[in-house]
């Protein structure tokens, strides 16, 4: 197999996070929002180390000869390259943070350095430390009589090199002070916006804690641990509830082995070496930076700056959809015509209203839904509970293995059960990642369905931050397919075949390959347009390359990981790849094959990753209504023409900003929001109307030229990736 057009998954992800970091230096972005990009970059990187780097460490230990199937790199080679690239990114982060804080100084916000303190400021901070902080500190030493205390993943510590005052030799002891837990993260000087972080405060006045020692070196550090939880060992124990297994494994995650050691500032070399040795971390994975190790404190800065709107993005609110008639039954409207919602531009409350209506409609006999991630204060959960309490047959598949949402989902599953909802947990070896809702109605002997298929979670919070699509349809074949999916899930199996829906793991990839093969037969008249978060599936990459060699025009919008390098002569020269990193997280998935009468358009919960196509239950739904399909394709084309927040992946594997020289600037996210606002205004001015027939156009939004980018942009949120197992030291 040719490797000429492949990129490594982990290195591609680092390129994505570099694009996130670029946004922190964009002077067109309000300055506080640039600080958020620094925070997003850091949180993304934290999760990357917990998940992907942890997995590679496992592989290096247990299967060192295994090689990446795309680039032929061993785990050790990948880890080495990751370390090099991260060490190149950290100075960029430091510079961005310094520049942003310099800009905030004009608004009175100043991150004070040790050398800039006046005697009065020093006296205040010293007194504050003595009175408020020192009594809460739990000091520990490391020597023959005192073992290394457990260092929590993500917690910040102050490390000190100590020498007893009575010692005349060079013998030293290592001291450790926790700087995060149960302490305020940020301390402001009275009456000012000047601040110091708690770890810096503790480091400055640590001498007060070690009365019998002289401090001969000190540092601020943090350890990151592998975050894998292994579930196989518990799955087959039939005497233990799966929810109890997950609760125990979530606790286990916190104690896995270290994979990264970070230091702030210019730490003492002996202290760095001591902690690296204690934690058994190779020097390659010891990272030094000048900016704070965690950006969790910026919410405190935001509160002090909220009266300065120029520092933030212009507030935007999801709008009412022009496809929905207010104060009319949504169920009846969906029976008349399919409805498509586009988040965050349109409001998720329309979908919630559908659930609330179904909860009280006497013709609704059952509601079935798959839940992967939901908001902490979820109206969707409330609607399901209400439906069960009203005597509806409600089934909720709650995926307890949703990464880092396990505890949240365990709690929701208990609440749903208490309300009378039938709760199942999914399949033993496959995560259920689909976004699928089925409402079954019975009117006498007549059975009908309302089916919803989405690209994103049933989560009110993320619906304002992520771009996602949701389709609501009364198509009987789609509803019948959804019923088959739920019936299979209830008995712990997967769907073999369907009429309308594409369902992984058995009926998605094979159909995608068929569609690509069909375009190959059309050669240069063929067309494929795909919008996804990540592309790693080798089979689909090879098939796309084959289509490119046949002359098929292929347009890919891939936000994050892309293991296919486009533009390689004789291989992928007919493929163009862009990535949009903007104000909102690009999360919708769109598949388009062909044009004209043979065009097929789908929306889906699945990326083109092996984990999605082979190891999860995913659903893709066809957009059967021509007007809606036109709308989705129009969205895709608008995004592909973005020349403000888009980067193009070039044949050398590097991303470069798309040029808008000589063109009208087009920020696709700003365009869609402006379009949504105009449509909502038109809707509020229009007289009441009756539902159109199924054949009528669904969307009344007019075609408009690209607006000037008057709406500021923001950026991505951490992606979630799979993690693996390592034992605690």
Image (cartoon, rainbow, N blue to C red):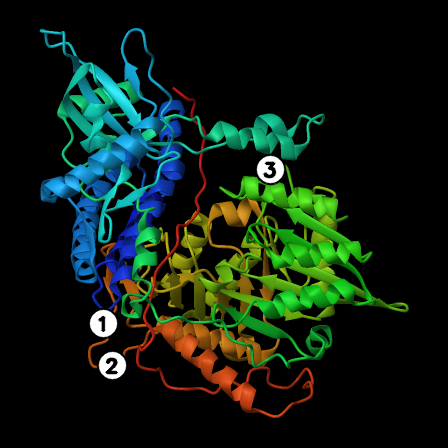
Task: Tell me the quadrant of the picture where the N terminus can be found.
Answer: top left
Residue 544: name its quadrant.
bottom left
Q: Is residue 493 left or right of residue 191?
A: right
Q: Which secondary structure, mark 3?
A: loop
The quarter holding residue 90 reads: top left
**Cα–Cα span, label 3 and label 2:** 50 Å
Query: Does any portion of residue 550 appear in the rendered image?
Result: no
**At x 20% / y 66%, what residue is drawn?**
27
Q: Earlier in the sequence, mark 3 or mark 2?
A: 3
Is there CB contact under 8 Å for labels 3 and 2?
Answer: no
Residue 196 drawn above or below residue 608 = above
Q: Nearer the viewer, residue 664 or 45?
A: 45
Q: Nearer the viewer, residue 25 or 693?
A: 25
Alpha-carbon distance for marks 1 and 3? 45 Å
Q: Which residue is mark 3?
A: 429
| Disc 1 secondary structure class | loop
Q: Which mark is residue 287?
A: none
State the quadrant of the C terminus: top left
Q: Residues within 10 Å of mark 2 (few under 14, many from 20)?
A: few
Other-residue count near label 3 (Cα within 10 Å), few / some / many at <14 / 14–19 / ≥20: few
Spot occupied by residue 32 in the image (x, y as percentages of width and height): 28, 60
Residue assigned mark 1: 659
Q: Is residue 274 visible in the rendered structure shown here?
A: yes
Q: Are marks 2 and 1 in contact (CB under 8 Å)?
A: yes
Residue drawn at x 74%, y 57% is 386
- Quadrant for residue 288, please give it: top left
* Position of residue 659 in the picture relative to residue 718 (left or right): left
Where is residue 228? Give x, y as percent. 46, 33
Front-most of 403 and 433? 403
Mark sitting on residue 663: 2
What residue is at 32 percent from the left and 71 percent from the top? 712
């Amino acid at each position: 197999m040719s490797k000429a057009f492949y990129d490594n998954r982990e290195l591609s992800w680092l390129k994505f996070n570099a694009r996130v970091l670029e946004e922190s230096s964009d002077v067109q972005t309000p300055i506080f929002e640039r600080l958020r990009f620094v925070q997003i970059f850091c949180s993304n990187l934290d999760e990357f180390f917990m998940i992907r780097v942890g997995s590679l460490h496992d592989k290096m230990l247990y299967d060192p000869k295994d090689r990446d199937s795309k680039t032929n790199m061993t785990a050790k080679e990948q880890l080495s390259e990751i370390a090099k690239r991260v060490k190149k990114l950290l100075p960029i982060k430091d510079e961005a943070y310094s520049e942003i804080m310099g800009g905030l100084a004009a608004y009175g916000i100043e991150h004070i350095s040790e050398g800039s303190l006046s005697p009065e400021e020093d006296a205040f901070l010293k007194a504050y430390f003595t009175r408020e902080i020192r009594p809460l500190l739990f000091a520990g030493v490391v020597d023959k009589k005192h073992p290394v205390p457990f260092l929590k993943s993500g917690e910040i510590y102050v490390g000190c090199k100590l020498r007893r005052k009575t010692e005349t030799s060079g013998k030293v002891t290592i001291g450790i002070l926790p700087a995060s837990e149960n302490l305020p993260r940020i301390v402001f000087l009275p009456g000012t916006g000047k601040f110091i972080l708690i770890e810096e405060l503790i480091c400055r006045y640590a001498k007060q804690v070690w009365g019998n020692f002289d401090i001969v070196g000190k540092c601020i550090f943090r350890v990151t641990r592998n975050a894998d939880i292994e579930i196989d060992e518990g799955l087959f124990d039939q005497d233990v509830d799966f929810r109890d297994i997950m609760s125990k494994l979530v606790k286990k995650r916190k104690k896995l082995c270290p994979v990264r050691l970070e230091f702030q500032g210019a730490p003492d070399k002996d202290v760095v070496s001591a902690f690296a040795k204690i934690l058994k971390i190779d020097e390659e994975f010891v990272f030094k930076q000048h900016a704070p190790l965690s950006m969790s404190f910026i919410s405190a800065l935001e509160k002090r700056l909220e009266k300065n709107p120029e520092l933030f993005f212009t507030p935007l609110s999801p709008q009412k959809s022009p496809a929905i008639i207010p104060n009319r039954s949504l169920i009846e409207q969906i029976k008349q015509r399919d409805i498509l919602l586009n988040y965050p531009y349109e409001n998720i409350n329309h979908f919630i209203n559908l659930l609330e209506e179904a909860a009280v409609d006497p013709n609704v006999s059952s509601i079935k839904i798959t839940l992967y991630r939901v908001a902490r204060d979820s109206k969707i959960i409330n609607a399901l509970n209400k439906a069960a309490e009203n005597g509806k047959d409600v089934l909720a598949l709650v995926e307890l293995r949703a990464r880092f949402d396990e505890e949240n989902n365990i709690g929701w599953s208990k609440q749903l059960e208490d309300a009378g909802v039938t709760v199942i947990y999914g399949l033993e070896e496959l995560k259920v990642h689909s976004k699928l809702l089925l409402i079954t109605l019975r009117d006498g002997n007549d059975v009908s369905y309302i089916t919803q298929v989405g690209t994103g979670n049933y989560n009110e919070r993320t619906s304002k931050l992520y771009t996602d699509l949701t389709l609501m349809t009364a198509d009987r074949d789609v509803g019948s397919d959804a019923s088959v999916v739920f019936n299979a899930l209830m008995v712990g199996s997967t769907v073999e075949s369907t009429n309308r829906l594409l369902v992984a793991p058995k009926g998605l990839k094979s159909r995608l390959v068929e569609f690509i093969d069909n375009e190959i037969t059309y050669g240069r008249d063929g067309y494929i347009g795909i919008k996804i978060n990540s592309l790693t599936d080798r089979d689909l990459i090879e098939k796309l390359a084959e289509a490119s060699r046949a002359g098929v025009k292929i347009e890919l919008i891939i936000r994050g990981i892309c293991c296919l390098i486009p533009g390689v002569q004789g291989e992928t020269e007919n493929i163009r790849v862009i990535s949009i990193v903007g104000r909102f997280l690009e999360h919708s998935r769109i598949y388009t094959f062909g044009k004209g009468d043979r065009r097929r358009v789908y929306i889906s919960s699945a990326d083109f990753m092996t984990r999605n196509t082979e190891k999860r239950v995913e659903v893709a739904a066809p957009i059967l209504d021509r007007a809606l399909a036109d709308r989705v394709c129009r969205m895709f084309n608008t995004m592909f023409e973005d020349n403000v927040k888009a980067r193009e992946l070039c044949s050398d594997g590097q991303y470069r900003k798309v040029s808008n020289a000589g063109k009208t600037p087009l920020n696709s996210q700003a365009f869609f929001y402006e379009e949504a606002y105009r449509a909502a205004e038109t809707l509020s001015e229009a007289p009441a109307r009756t539902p159109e027939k199924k054949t009528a156009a669904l969307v009344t939004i007019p075609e408009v030229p690209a607006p000037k980018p008057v709406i500021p942009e923001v950026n991505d949120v951490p992606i979630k990736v799979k993690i693996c197992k390592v034992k605690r030291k």
